[in-house]
Amino acid sequence: MSDVPEPSGSSSGLPLLEARGLTVNASWGHIFGPVDFTVAEGGVTVFAGPESRGRAALLLTVAGRMRPSRGELTAFGRTNDAQHLFNRAAVAWIDEVDGIQQAIRIRDVVTELKRWSSPWWKWVTPAGEDDLERVCRPVFGSYPLPDLEAFVEELPELSSALFRIAVGNHRRPPLLVIGGVDRLTRRENQVLLMERLVDLGRTQTVITADVNAVAPAGGVRAVIPVDNLTEGQFLGLDHEDRT
């Protein structure tokens, strides 16, 4: 993480999320907790812990997509109000909630976003370059945008991650929660992705995860080691396990 630039934007640094004894259990058993942490407003915060169903569930919980079973999560001034948090957070690059069908073109995904953002009675034309620019440029920065006719499954891993983040973040709410940067297999791609998250952190609060509990550097506001995470991958989330 030390390879990314220091942010030049300002943020209040006030607590945006505070967890005390936060615990989540699914219908099939314990997932994570209890954990305590504070996430400041603005910039990038990294939860440090191995990739696991517990880590993914923690990210979903701080985005309001899973409800705490025990403990407290105070976010945006309200405690254990998952719906309030849900409405102020975007989730991206976490397969359990935002997986994109692979055999689909970029144009079709962006067109569908246009439909969701338009009144029900309005005719929506297929997405063009201007639509792609509007959705993707804030996340991609100077990195080349994907071709509208490309299939999602054809994208290189960094482009695929950035595209999913752009789609998930198209509303640009105050909080953006993103799957772990260590999901990328190449170190240089992890560095490039973190550069883009730091840039997004100038105008949003960004939370992600990484297996490495390194000291905050390179534009990352805080790295928070998180224990009590259930190992292994998701067996699946029943409907009642999610918000």
Image (cartoon, grey):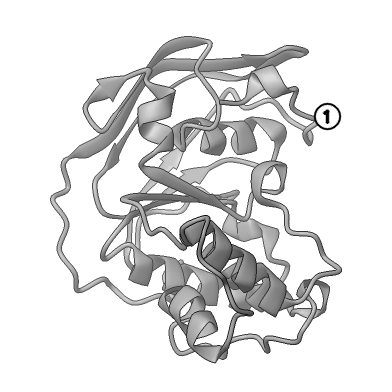
Q: Of residues 187 and 85, which is closer to you in this image?
A: 85
Above or below, 133 against 29 in this view is: below
Q: Give the percent coordinates (x, y) of residue 183.
A: 68, 58
- For disc 1, the neighbor class at 10 Å (few under 14, some 14 to 19, many from 20) is few
Q: Give the percent coordinates (x, y) of residue 100.
A: 73, 58
Q: How many marks?
A: 1
Q: Give the percent coordinates (x, y) of residue 164.
A: 61, 64
Residue 144 quadrant: bottom right
Residue that sits furthest to the front in the current view = 121
Above or below, 195 against 88 in this view is: below
Q: Of residues 230 and 68, which is closer to you in this image?
A: 68
Residue 154 quadrant: bottom right
Amino acid type for the residue under numbered disc 1:
Leu
Disc 1 is placed on an element classified as loop
Q: In which quadrant will I find the C terminus?
A: top right
Above or below, 240 against 149 in this view is: above
Q: Relative to residue 201, is residue 126 drawn left or right?
A: right
Q: Residue at x 26, y 66 (%)?
A: 202
Q: Residue at x 13, y 50 (%)?
A: 12
Residue that sits furthest to the right in the current view = 103
Above or below, 123 against 95 in this view is: below
**Which residue in the protein does label 1 denote?**
235
Q: Residue at x 26, y 63 (%)?
A: 203
